[in-house]
C-alpha cells in the first residue's frame, strides 16, 4: 500500500513538472511564432483570443514570458494600426498588472487607453469590460461611489450581468 501511494505521489509530481515545462514551452513558442509570422489583423485577433484563454486557465508561472507575449501583440497591433487589437492588448496588460502586481496605478491608464481604442473601433463590449475593471479597482480600493459610477458606465455600453452583480455589492 505504501509503495502504491508513493508511486502515485511521484507520478503526480513528475506529471505536474512536465506540465510546467510544457506550459512554458507553449508561451515561448507563441512568442516566437508571433514575432516570425506575417503581421496580420487575423493574427492579432488569434493571439488576443489565446491570451484571454490563458487568463481564464490561470496565469502561467512564467510571468515575464506572458507579459512579453502581451507586449509583443501590442507592438504588432500598433504596427498594423489595429484599433481593436491595441485595445485588447492594453486591456490584457492592465489585467496582468492587476493580477500579478496589484498594480492598480499602472492598470488604470492602460484601461483608459484601451477604452479609447475600443471606442474608436466601435467595440462596445470592450469599452464595457474596461469600465468594469476600473470599477473592480475602485471597489478593491474602497472607493465605492467611484466603483458604482464605473459599473454604471460599463452597463451603458453593454448589458453585462457581472457588472450588475458588482454594482449591487458596491452599495
Image (tube, rainbow, N blue to C red):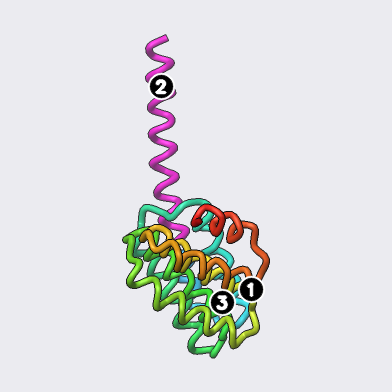
Question: Is 21 colored magenta in this rendering?
Answer: yes
Give the mark nearer the N terminus: 1 vs 3: 3
Decide: is 75 above or below 141: below
> Does the rendering let one see residue 28?
no
> SS at mark 2?
helix
- Determine whether the residue tagged by mark 1 lies in a helix, strand or loop: helix
**What label sits on residue 156 in the rendered view?**
1
Contact flag, marks 1 and 2 (Cβ < 8 Å): no
Q: Position of residue 8 (x, y in %)?
A: 44, 23
Task: State which region is magenta.
Answer: 1-28
Q: Which circle's residue, 1 or 2, is located before the other in the chain?
A: 2
Residue beneath disc 3: 44
Q: How far apart are marks 3 and 2 (CA)?
A: 44 Å
Residue 58 tag number: none
Q: Which of marks 1 and 2 is in front?
A: 1
Q: On the rendered image, what quadrant is the N terminus found in?
A: top left
Could you say which quadrant of the image residue 139 lies in?
bottom left
Quarter of the image holding residue 85? bottom right
**Frontmost residue, 86 versus 143:** 143
Whether residue 24 appears in magenta in the rendering, the answer is: yes
* 9 vs 42: above or below: above
Residue visible at 36% across and 61% down in the picture: 141
Q: Which of marks 3 and 2 is nearer the N terminus?
A: 2
Tell me the chief SS of the magenta region.
helix
Q: Position of residue 27 (x, y in %)?
A: 44, 61
Between label 3 and label 2, give the one nearer the viewer: 3
Residue visible at 44% across and 65% down in the picture? 95
Counting from the top left corner in percent of width and height, residue 13 is at 38, 33
Residue at mark 2 = 7
Amino acid at each position: 500500500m505504501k509503495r502504491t501511494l508513493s508511486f502515485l505521489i511521484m507520478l503526480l509530481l513528475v506529471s505536474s513538472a512536465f506540465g510546467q515545462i510544457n506550459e512554458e514551452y507553449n508561451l515561448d513558442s507563441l512568442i516566437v511564432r508571433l514575432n516570425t509570422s506575417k503581421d496580420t489583423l487575423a493574427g492579432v485577433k488569434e493571439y488576443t483570443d489565446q491570451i484571454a484563454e490563458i487568463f481564464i486557465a490561470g496565469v502561467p508561472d512564467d510571468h515575464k514570458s506572458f507579459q512579453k507575449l502581451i507586449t509583443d501583440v501590442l507592438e504588432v497591433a500598433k504596427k498594423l494600426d489595429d484599433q481593436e487589437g491595441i485595445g485588447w492588448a492594453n486591456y490584457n496588460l492592465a489585467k496582468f498588472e492587476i493580477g500579478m502586481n496589484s498594480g492598480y496605478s499602472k492598470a488604470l491608464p492602460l484601461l483608459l487607453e484601451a477604452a479609447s481604442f475600443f471606442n474608436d473601433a466601435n467595440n462596445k463590449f470592450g469599452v464595457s469590460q474596461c469600465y468594469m475593471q476600473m470599477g473592480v479597482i475602485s471597489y478593491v480600493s474602497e472607493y465605492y461611489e467611484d466603483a458604482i459610477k464605473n459599473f454604471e458606465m460599463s452597463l451603458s455600453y453593454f448589458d453585462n450581468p457581472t457588472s450588475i452583480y458588482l454594482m449591487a455589492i458596491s452599495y
